[in-house]
Image (cartoon, rainbow, N blue to C red):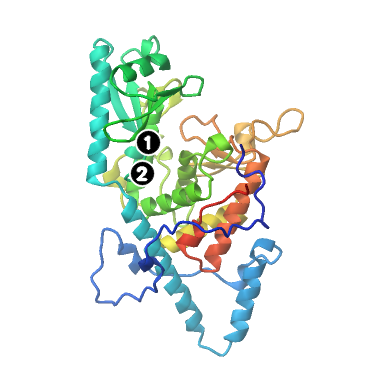
Amino acid sequence: MNVLKERNPNESNNSKHEVYFSKELTSTIAYKNNNEKKDEDNYSYYSNAFSPEISISSVNTDDKYVKNYYDSKSQYYRKNKNKKSGDYEKSIKEYAISLEKEMMDFYLKNVPTEESKKKKLSLLKRIQKMFSERYPTLGIKAHLFGSSVNELGTYNSDVDICLTTRDRIDCELRDMDVIKRILEENGITQVRTTPNAKVPICNFVDPETSLSCDINVNNTIALYNTKMIQTYALIDERVKPLIMTIKYFAKQRMLNDAKTGTLSSYCWVNLVINFLQMRTPPILPCLHAMSKDVPEEERIIIDGVDCTFYSDLDKLKGFGKDNKETLYELIYGFFKTFANDFDYITDVVSVRSGCYKKKSDNGWNVSSNNTRIRNNYFCVEEPFNTARNLANCANRYSVKGLRWEFKRAFKILKSRGSLEELCEPYKPDP
């Protein structure tokens, strides 16, 4: 089912829903006193200069999605034309600080706890023992990958495990039914397999930890993917709270499941990283470009894919220090970019290049009979396997719905809506 097919700008979504945020989040945030001690680990960027970019002259009044905002803002200016000009800027700053507080509060409440990390490591060790004892000659190693280790997971994130073997090709464990049988022999029930997927997996819920887990075999590119995302996440202190907030938005709005025609969580992460690479000045570098001088014999090639990237965190940290944008400015800019600025017809989001590419560069624009191919209505290049479009599960209806969701989010932020409003759960019509 394509959950975005019938989504449109006239659709209401006013049904009651669970409140996900504490009452304190909606309270007014007072200005920080200059002498107030700041939490340098999590809030140091609050002291950065704030330069709001919202102005009536910049609003596209032909865009029906923001026309109501334009009208209301015009009325505000007419009503307050005799007030000091600083009053309006002050109210914007108060809202920005309040929204940032919501984002940081959400982030800090959802980061993995030491207990949740121990549970995942315990499961990993049991899986390692389970398979290495059964196949002692295969050199089996169990690895965590994905959100469990890339710094962008929550305390209750699912667990992704990759089993690697000495012989990657001729291996009995490539058969998911073999994986399933071994798991069931060790007391794990309700094991499901997806043997025909691009990356076959076994899924189960661990009875000891109640964690949902996916296991694959020898998908080693995913391990380098995880390391790359982790590196980006640790370069600048704004990256993790921004990505986790946007991932939460995508989950609440039913936009994070490739099986239903939307975007995978990994695709959303790529969108945010590329957005941060393209700020002026940039907040994140292009790790692939920084590795271009690595000699051919030292490059990491897996299944013909170049997985080399620069990863020296000691030298990378502080890369974006010249950019003083706050979390508010960044989330506002992200939704503005994909609501109004990004050219869905011609452009490709490319973390590997650190910029936008053209669809024609990848052969993703048109086929020989001038029709679109492989659902390339929205293109997000996979950073390692550049022939893969991470957004190709989204057809024309999905992309139309996604663009409406970007416009909805942008409109909410322009009208100073709360994070709770931004992330209100989407309720499809019965």
Q: Is residue 338 above or below residue 55?
A: above
Question: Callout 2 environment at 10 Å: few (<14), some (14 to 19), or many (20+)?
Answer: some
Residues at circles 2 and 1 in contact by the CB criterion of under 8 Å: yes
> Which quadrant is the N terminus positioned in?
top right
Q: Is residue 152 above or below residue 75?
A: above
Q: Is residue 293 visible to the viewer in this orientation of the structure?
A: no
Residue 80 place in picture, x, y as percent: 57, 86
Res. 296 image quadrant: top left
Residue 124 place in picture, x, y as percent: 27, 29
**Dot label at residue 146:** 1
Res. 341 image quadrant: bottom right
Q: Is residue 123 above or below residue 325?
A: above
Residue 54 place in picture, x, y as percent: 54, 69
Q: Nearer the viewer, residue 51 or 394?
A: 394
Q: What residue is rendered at 47% in x and 77% in y? A: 91
User: Which of marks 1 and 2 precedes in the sequence?
Assistant: 1
Q: Nearer the viewer, residue 227 or 256?
A: 256
The residue that label 2 is drawn on is 153
Please name the amino acid that badge 2 sits on: Gly
Please name the amino acid that badge 1 sits on: Gly
Q: Is residue 268 visible to the viewer in this orientation of the structure?
A: yes
Q: Is residue 13 left or right of residue 290?
A: right
Instruction: State the SS at label 1.
Output: helix
- How many marks overall? 2
Instruction: State the SS at label 2.
Output: loop
